[in-house]
């Protein structure tokens, strides 16, 4: 079955939706929020941002609330909020799976052996 | 009043969708001191101004709207605002891209998420895809449907238009298709690359300035040469087609029957020294009546209907048919017993250069007749030809093929009273079949 356009959000998309969770914002405020939240790890380019805003508006994840000169302010819609929550849950499941796997490997000692470069005896 | 700075014009070295080459070319020009001016792109020609050489970055961003609206001409106010905030200025547009420039090295990249960049290319992909399928439909699909359903006769159009002109048109159509395939595959490659999370700059090769200049020169030569040839072919083809249409509208190729006969006779006498046995490689109305009566002293009187538009001959040569004659005769032949045959006779005659051309022509004429709502078959006796078909559409139509010669005869006979002499289709079909000869 073909994927829906925004079935899996990229990291940038995810953070843009997160930003709108704070309330209505314009593009520049979104970038500032993301930089602050990720401590500068994600520095979003302007083209990436306006492509995401355009796509989200098209998918009805956000809606325009006001226009002041060249500045447009958007707010998240209920559809956007659902998409954001689903993505959070998906990521939480990913993290939970990864944590469980790491714990299991730790208890079996495999991780320790691999770290020390020891061969596992086949017998 | 500010002094106008001198403008420099440069041909773009590549098509608009070759993002990497465009960006590198503009950056190389800036290193030489040539900076693209605002709205400085028209038909692939960039307008530059000279400044102090410096390192700048150019980026091409896909347009959000790809139609002919005003929105497609400039980036949205929001996009401009965001770009300016982060050190990028909108300069111009070319094709389906907006060109931005940053004069500072600290400005962050325009695109920081390749997967989002792939999404931005989606409208362009859709547009190129639609263009490809649209071209394929109009160049191949639609003519094929019309041809196979008998609504269009390709070979007849080809011969009427002139085979060389037809081949030229076909070549232009194929070229258009190939161009759209190249564009489509380029955009598809870029989208796939970006969707995998690879940046566009991954493909940037580590060329030296000299190597890059050579690559650009080669690209520019190929691009503009192919562009020039393509445009030239389109102009030549369009002019030829318009000339042909104008000639047809003015009936310039139609020679009055009596003028054709006298000219043909004169030329024949000059060449062979005696009178020709026949003027046409088929029976005309006089010969038709003469053969039906066995009398040889009849003459033809033109009808006064549509003067200048009837009783003509249009003869030409073509690559697929060494002789093509469109013949029309409208009038009457007086019989010795006082009766007369009043009719309109149309003959399309082709002496083709290849047997398959003759066979396909017959098939096309038949197919065209069969879609007529008044179509009904007329049975024929055994005729001395390879193929013979007769049907009634608006008027009785006879299609004959003898070896490489095809002849289509339409005879409309008028029968007002007992003084009008008429022939059955089986009678006149036999006469025309027997009269088929080479010219």
Image: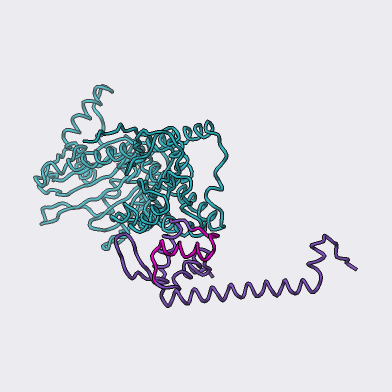
Chain colours: A purple, B cyan
How many numbered callouts? 0
The verdict on residue A34 being magenta is yes
Instruction: Give residue A58's quadrant in the image.
Output: bottom left
Residue A31 x %, y %? 45, 62
Residue B311 x %, y %? 16, 42
Q: Is residue B249 visible?
A: yes
Residue B116 x %, y %? 48, 60
Instruction: Say which quadrant the C terminus of chain B sits in.
Output: top left
Residue A8 x %, y %? 53, 68
Considering depth in this image, is B402 or B325 the residue closer to the camera?
A: B325
- Residue at (52, 66) in percent of width and height: A37
Instruction: Say which quadrant the N terminus of chain B sits in.
Output: top left
Considering depth in this image, is B21 or B187 the residue closer to the camera?
A: B21
Q: Which residues are magenta?
A: A24-43
Considering depth in this image, is B164 or B188 the residue closer to the camera?
A: B188
Instruction: Give residue B163's quadrant in the image.
Output: top left
Q: Is residue B147 visible?
A: no
- Residue at (57, 57) in percent of width and height: B196
Q: Eyeballing the image, is B236 above or below B99?
A: above
Q: Eyeballing the image, is A44 above or below B362?
A: below
Q: Eyeballing the image, is B63 above or below B304?
A: below
């Amino acid at each position: 079955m073909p994927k829906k356009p925004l079935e899996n959000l990229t990291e940038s998309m995810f953070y843009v939706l997160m930003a709108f969770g704070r309330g209505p914002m314009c593009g520049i405020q979104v970038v500032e929020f993301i930089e602050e939240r990720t401590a500068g790890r994600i520095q979003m380019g302007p083209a990436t941002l306006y492509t995401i805003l355009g796509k989200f508006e098209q998918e009805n994840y956000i809606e325009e609330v006001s226009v002041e000169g060249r500045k447009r302010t958007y707010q998240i819609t209920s559809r956007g909020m659902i998409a954001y929550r689903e993505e959070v849950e998906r990521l939480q499941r990913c993290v939970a799976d990864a944590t469980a796997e790491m714990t299991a490997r730790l208890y079996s000692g495999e991780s320790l052996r691999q770290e020390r470069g020891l061969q596992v005896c086949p017998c | 009043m500010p002094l106008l700075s001198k403008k420099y014009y440069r041909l773009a070295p590549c098509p608009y969708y070759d993002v990497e080459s465009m960006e590198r070319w503009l950056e190389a020009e800036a290193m030489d001191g040539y900076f693209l001016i605002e709205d400085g792109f028209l038909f692939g020609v960039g307008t530059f101004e000279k400044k102090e050489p410096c390192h700048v970055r150019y980026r091409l961003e896909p347009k959000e709207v790809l139609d002919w609206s005003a929105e497609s001409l400039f980036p949205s106010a929001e996009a401009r605002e965001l770009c300016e905030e982060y050190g990028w200025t909108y300069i111009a547009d070319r094709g389906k891209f907006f060109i931005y420039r940053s004069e500072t090295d600290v400005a962050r990249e325009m695109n920081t998420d390749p997967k989002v960049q792939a999404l931005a290319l989606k409208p362009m992909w859709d547009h190129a895809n639609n263009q490809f399928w649209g071209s394929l439909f109009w160049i191949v699909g639609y003519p094929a449907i019309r041809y196979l359903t008998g609504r269009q006769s390709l070979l007849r159009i080809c011969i009427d238009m002139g085979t060389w002109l037809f081949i030229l048109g076909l070549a232009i159509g194929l070229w258009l298709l190939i161009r759209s395939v190249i564009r489509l595959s380029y955009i598809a490659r870029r989208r796939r690359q970006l969707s995998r999370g690879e940046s566009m700059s991954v493909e940037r090769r580590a060329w030296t300035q000299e190597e890059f200049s050579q690559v650009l020169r080669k690209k520019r030569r190929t691009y503009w040469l192919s562009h020039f040839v393509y445009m030239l072919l389109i102009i030549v083809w369009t002019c030829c087609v318009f000339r042909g249409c104008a000639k047809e509208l003015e009936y310039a190729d139609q020679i009055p029957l009596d003028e054709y006969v006298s000219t043909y006779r004169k030329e024949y006498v000059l060449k062979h020294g005696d009178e020709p046995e026949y003027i046409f490689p088929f029976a005309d109305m006089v010969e038709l009546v003469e053969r039906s009566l066995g009398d040889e002293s009849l003459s033809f009187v033109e009808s006064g209907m549509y003067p200048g538009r009837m009783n003509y001959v249009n003869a030409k040569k073509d690559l697929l048919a060494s002789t093509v004659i469109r013949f029309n005769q409208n009038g009457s032949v007086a019989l010795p017993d006082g009766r007369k045959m009043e009719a309109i006779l149309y003959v399309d005659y082709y002496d083709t250069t290849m047997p398959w051309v003759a066979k396909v022509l017959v098939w096309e004429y038949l197919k065209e007749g069969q879609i007529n709502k008044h179509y009904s078959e007329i049975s024929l006796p055994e005729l001395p030809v390879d193929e013979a078909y007769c049907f009634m559409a608006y008027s009785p139509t006879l299609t004959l093929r003898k070896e490489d010669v095809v002849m289509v005869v339409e005879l409309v006979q008028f029968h007002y009273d007992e003084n009008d002499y008429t022939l059955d289709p089986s009678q006149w079909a036999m006469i025309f079949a027997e009269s088929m000869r080479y010219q």
